[in-house]
Image (tube, rainbow, N blue to C red):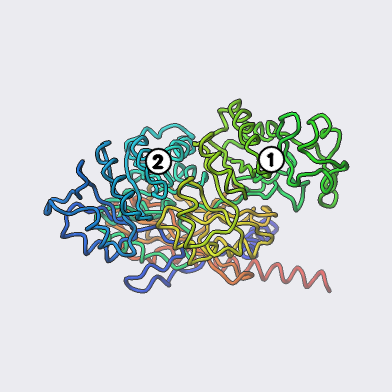
Amino acid sequence: MKNRFVIFLCFFSMLLTIGVVPQRVDAQSEEGEVAMNVAPSIVVEVSEYTAVSEALEVADVLAFSIDDAGTVVFSDRTDCSIEDLYGLCKETVPAVRIQTQAQADSLADYLSESGAPDFFVLSSSADLIRSVRESCPVSRGIYDARTADLTASNAGYALAGKACAAGAQVILLENRVDRALIEQIQARALLAWVWAGDCAETIWGAATSGCYGVMGQNGSAIRDVLTMFRDDAILHPVYLAGHRGYPKKYNENSTAGVEAAFQAGATHAEIDVHLTADGEVVIMHDATLDRTTNGTGTIAQMTLEEIRRYKIVDNVMLAGQSEIPTLEEMLEILQKPEFSAKLLILEIKANNAALVSTLQEKIEAYPDVRDRLLFITFYEELLPELAAQMPDIPRGFLDSLSKTDFLQRMSPVNAFIDNILASELVSVSGAAWIRDYGYAVWAWTYNDVGSIVSGIHAGFLGLTVNNVGDMSARIRSIVAPASISADEAKNGSLVTAILFNGSEVSMPAEWIQISDDYGVFSLQVSDEDNFVSFTYYTEPVKAEGGGCSGSMAGETLFAAAAILSAAAVFVVLISVRRKRG
């Protein structure tokens, strides 16, 4: 029994070491301010002209409808043009809802004549979005999927592909949507917005769903909820892409490295593709075999048979030899049941349209994994080729972009932004800037845990990393049962922390009442080594048998956790001193 107690205490000591000891949640935003790094956009849809002024005080995006003649539809005014309303928007991004081809034509005419660069076109019709985008490529699409059938297990991946093919960068979902659906959409570098309505409970539900935009008709109500979150809140899912697999421990661009990266907690693996002389696609970073294999030669001038005579050798100490893989062998990894929620990012390493065409042919043979693929490239001129030949597979640009040119360069090809750490957009301010235009920051390349943690803390969506194992035992999100008893809420309860490697750990959390019958749990964890903290939130939980007042619930569990953690440290220190003595 004594040994078991020591083991139990040591377990809490481990949690302390990796920075997951729960903290009391006290500090929140200043009154009226949203303090989170890259909080969800506040998206307000107006149907009355008299509501516009108030909406613009808080809205990041203002949505409105037009009729077939291009007049804004208001219940209290009949002569407001798109130009009139656009003139009021200032720094707020306009989103125009359309339902007919005539409305699409009227919007396209206005955008073409005005040259306005910052409009969204919002519709439940992919064809209408595509129609406006073809006439005005710099506009961006919002695909309204609130009435779509999203019951399939991988519906989010497929929906992202459909929206991408329509030229949409954002997908609008109904409230109370499954968080897993949002995770799938945003894993393909599109953003999800959630219609929240106007009540606090559904707004909390939208904000904690992981989405990048909360939409309703009462912007002040949305803002009031968002101000309740701590400045270190982590609301959206964070994706880690293993750079060339797992190069800190395995040969780069090897199948073993990709599988190991997935097992260690990578949501994606980024691999490099080249075209051989006989039309095959091999996975290698360099254009030659010289650096990473026991052979020499230029890939584009060699056949697959010639290339496969050689092996990837000892890119890292004790990695041994690995086969030079083909694209097909990498796609087959995604077919394995244990990797059914993993994605591949294919970096196109040569400015070669034939490579794009060959990729299309190869991928068509793997329809079951098509919805879990993304492209990236440094070659901006290849983005139109990718958009034309495989419009349903999201494509990203790797070279640096700025606040002044990303819309003009990325919107026409509906490409996402995957920039180097030194880029202007890879910053807290840059991420906040592009968020309201339907973009999130993906960034590369992170070499150590400190830099990864800083990227997560900055609010970035995706990070390409060399050592995904650094994050294996760290928290990615927390979940709680859909309902608990009122007594459990009052006295504190355990939530399940999901680690990056998929493991689950029960942890004490604080109850925050959000309505008479609902609350959320929050868990603040401290990373003392990197001088940051993170606060995670569950989605709303129903307290059966009546509400629970106050946010002080859970102090008993917090105190117990603190005592156990301190005791664990004491036991470990005593053990160390005895050994040294």
97 with respect to 434 (left or right): left
Percent across and percent down for residue 151 are 41, 33
Going 61% across and 41% down the picture, which residue do you hit? 344
Q: Nearer the viewer, residue 43 or 195?
A: 43
* Mark 1 Cα shell of 10 Å, populated few (<14), some (14-19), many (≥20): many
Which residue is disc 1 drawn over?
Answer: 273
* Mark 2 Cα shell of 10 Å, populated few (<14), some (14-19), many (≥20): some
259 with respect to 72 (left or right): right
Query: Up-down: is 551 above or below 305?
Result: below
Q: SS for tag 1?
A: strand
Q: Mark 2 or 1, which is nearer the eye?
A: 2
Question: Which quadrant of the view contains residue 201?
Answer: bottom left
Q: Nearer the viewer, residue 307 or 35?
A: 307
- Type of residue at label 2? Glu
Percent across and percent down for residue 366 are 60, 28
Query: Split into 4 quadrants, where in the image is the C terminus?
Result: bottom right
Going 57% across and 42% down the picture, which residue do you hit? 374
Percent across and percent down for residue 214 are 35, 54
- Type of residue at label 1? Val
Q: Nearer the viewer, residue 487 or 405?
A: 405
**What residue occupies the far top of the structure in this picture?**
365
* Of the image marks 2 and 1, the number of the one nearer the N terminus: 2
Residue 78, visible in the rendered structure: yes
Which residue is disc 2 drawn over?
Answer: 134
Residue 202, visible in the rendered structure: no
